[in-house]
Image (cartoon, grey):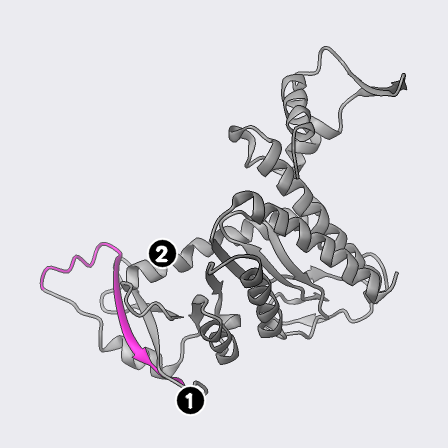
Amino acid sequence: MTEENVNQLLQVAKKLGDLGMDQQNSQQLVLDLDSTCCPTYGKQEAGEYIYHYGLNGYHPFVAFEGLTGLALDVRHRHGKSYTSTHAEDYLVEMLAHYQQRSSDPTMLVRGDSGFAKPEIYQQCECRGAHYVIKLKNNARLMHHAQHLVQYTNGTDYTKTEHQYFKMAYQADSWDQSRTVAIKATRKAETLLFSEFQFVVTDFAHLSPQTIFQLYQKRGNMENFIKEMKTGFFADKTDSPSFLANKVRLALSFIAYNIIHLMKQLAFPQEKKTTMIDTIRFQLFHIAGKVTEHARQVQIHLSSTNVYNTLFWEVLTRIQRLNL
């Protein structure tokens, strides 16, 4: 395999994502950005110690569509890569691609504090994409937030309380002032001590509660990453070669989107959230026999297979697809 082959595999995976987006026929796109860890247990090439996870491995960049769960981009990176290394370049490619595919789409970019860098904000603003990205706590933000928290005589200190605020803020590395939403959480029995969370956004006219609701829906991405790793072995790194492990990750990317499309396009509504392990058990790892004669291929399943109805329903829907 070569780097060119890897790029070809990635293009196949991305086209599968495009196919899923076309089937949804939606003008709304949510780009959830994150990174994950693929542990290494030997002398794998480019495997480095990752302080955030406390182990040796690779540190891939991943992007999912938050509304459908489709994988939009996966980039294999060495262990020393930071969460947002080259993230603005990958983001520019995705924004340009989806803006070309659709007329005036509404795009939202979400990311944790690892993606809190002005280059990402600027690319979103230049390309008309909205963003909600978590900020790391710092002394200036904490100072502003502490002066906004309010307590009254009616405050019940036996219950956890949340307060929301919004302010204009400009960090030293920013070229302009931006809107920052603040969430202050005072836990029960902690009196006047509050914990703070900060989110930077271009949604200047939304309430801070709504901004945090938009950000918190990003939590589904953890399930997408877990499914790609546990269901499609994206974190398997048993080759000493960095390129070979890169190929394996690209194949996991393809497999994830194929099965996701299968669920999206061919599964009954109540089965669309089925995990890959269950799909393998019910539809793939089953006893059967395939025969071919008279220009026909026939599938024979056991009459005692309890998932026969689901199998034939899904197969029939696949055969009717017009892609």
> Three-letter amino acid code at disc 1?
Asp
Q: Where is mark 1, residue-wise?
A: 172
User: Going by the image, does 168 lie left or right of 220?
Assistant: left
Local crowd size for mark 2, using a 10 Å CA cut-off: few (<14), some (14–19), many (≥20): few
Residue 106 point in image, percent of width and height: 44, 59
Identify which residue, 190 or 242, lies in the foreground. 242
Is the residue 263 above or below the residue 63 in the image? above
Q: From which residue to which does the magenta span run?
A: 153-171
Q: Which mark is drawn over residue 213?
A: 2
Confirm whether residue 99 shows in the render. yes
Identify which residue, 208 or 90, lies in the foreground. 90
Which corner quadrant of the image does residue 312 belong to?
top right
Q: In percent of the image, x 68 and y 52: which residue is there?
A: 15
Is 165 magenta? The answer is yes
Residue 46 point in image, percent of width and height: 78, 71
Residue 149 point in image, percent of width and height: 22, 71
Quarter holding the N terminus?
A: bottom right
